[in-house]
Image (cartoon, rainbow, N blue to C red):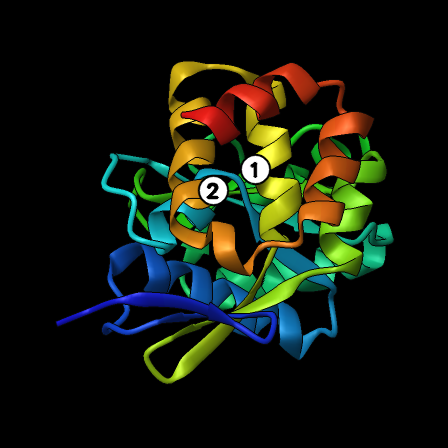
């Protein structure tokens, strides 16, 4: 029987990696090979922790890179059998440096895919700087801190985002830092939404 626990800044997912996890793990290992700081965020974090909802993408933030670094990375992706379903990987640096995301997927596959973006604002930088570890089976990947993930999901405000926030808060509330959660909800201006979440 699988389960998920949050202990000592590590999210332990007691099951074998699924198709989404395998894609995230493979991409994470490639980024590590090039010493690229990265963190998985958004809906994938909720799904990783057991929320049952469909998704076609895995959001990952990477530190800002030079054109040469991106070219080396995309060459490695190509060699490992990845492609850009939405645009050629050769356009990656132009897209990323303009603040857009790029899609990366196993060759000839549209979904699931990774949506890769340079860190852009203080919340992206905080996710990268204060990432925690998710352990899936024997593998580990960095994920955004859950307090910031919850607050940012409340800020986005779409139904699926609020449901992701409810899932994470309900599941991990005893292990969350109330101080950090209140800090992020204040920075994002979602104190009222947070109050409703606590009362739900």
* Extreme residue toward the front, this view: 199
Alpha-carbon span between mark 1 and mark 2: 7 Å
Q: Which mark is residue 196?
A: none
Q: If you read the primary sequence from the N terminus, does the residue marked by circle 1 or circle 2 appear first? A: 1
Q: Would you name the residue on which mark 1 appears?
A: 150
Q: Residues within 10 Å of mark 2 (few under 14, many from 20)?
A: many
**Is residue 91 at least partly visible in the picture?**
yes
- Left or right: where does residue 82 sit relative to residue 117? left
**Horizontal and vertical percent for residue 157?**
53, 15
Callout 1: SS: helix
Question: How many labels sit on residues?
Answer: 2
**Horizontal and vertical percent for residue 37?**
74, 64
Q: Disc 1, disc 2: CB below 8 Å?
A: yes
Q: Is residue 93 above or below residue 70?
A: above
Given residues 194 and 128, the one toward you in this image is: 194
Q: Quadrant of residue 92?
A: top right
Residue depicted at x 64% and y 15%: 192
**Horizontal and vertical percent for residue 165?**
47, 34
Residue depicted at x 49% and y 76%: 140
Residue depicted at x 39% and y 68%: 5
Given residues 27 and 135, the one toward you in this image is: 135
Q: Residues within 10 Å of mark 1 (few under 14, many from 20)?
A: many
Quadrant (top left/top right/bottom left/bottom right) for the N terminus = bottom left
Q: Would you name the residue on which mark 2 appears?
A: 169
């Amino acid at each position: 029987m699988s389960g998920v626990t949050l202990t000592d800044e590590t999210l332990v997912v007691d099951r074998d990696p699924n198709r989404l996890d395998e894609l995230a793990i493979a991409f994470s290992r490639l980024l590590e090979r090039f010493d690229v700081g990265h963190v998985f965020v958004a809906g994938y974090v909720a799904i990783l922790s057991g929320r049952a909802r469909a998704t076609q993408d895995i959001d990952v933030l990477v530190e800002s890179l030079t054109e040469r670094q991106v070219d080396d990375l995309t060459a490695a992706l190509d060699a490992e059998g990845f492609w850009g379903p939405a645009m050629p990987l050769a356009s990656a640096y132009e897209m990323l440096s303009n603040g857009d995301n790029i899609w990366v997927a196993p060759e000839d596959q549209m979904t699931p895919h990774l949506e890769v973006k340079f860190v852009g604002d203080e919340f992206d930088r905080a996710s990268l700087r204060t990432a925690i570890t998710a352990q899936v089976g024997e593998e580990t990947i960095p994920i955004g801190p859950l307090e910031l993930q919850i607050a940012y999901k409340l800020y986005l405000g779409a139904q699926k985002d609020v449901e992701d926030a409810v899932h994470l808060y309900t599941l991990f509330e005893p292990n969350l830092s109330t101080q950090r959660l209140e800090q992020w909800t204040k920075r994002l201006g979602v104190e009222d939404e947070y109050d409703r979440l606590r009362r739900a």
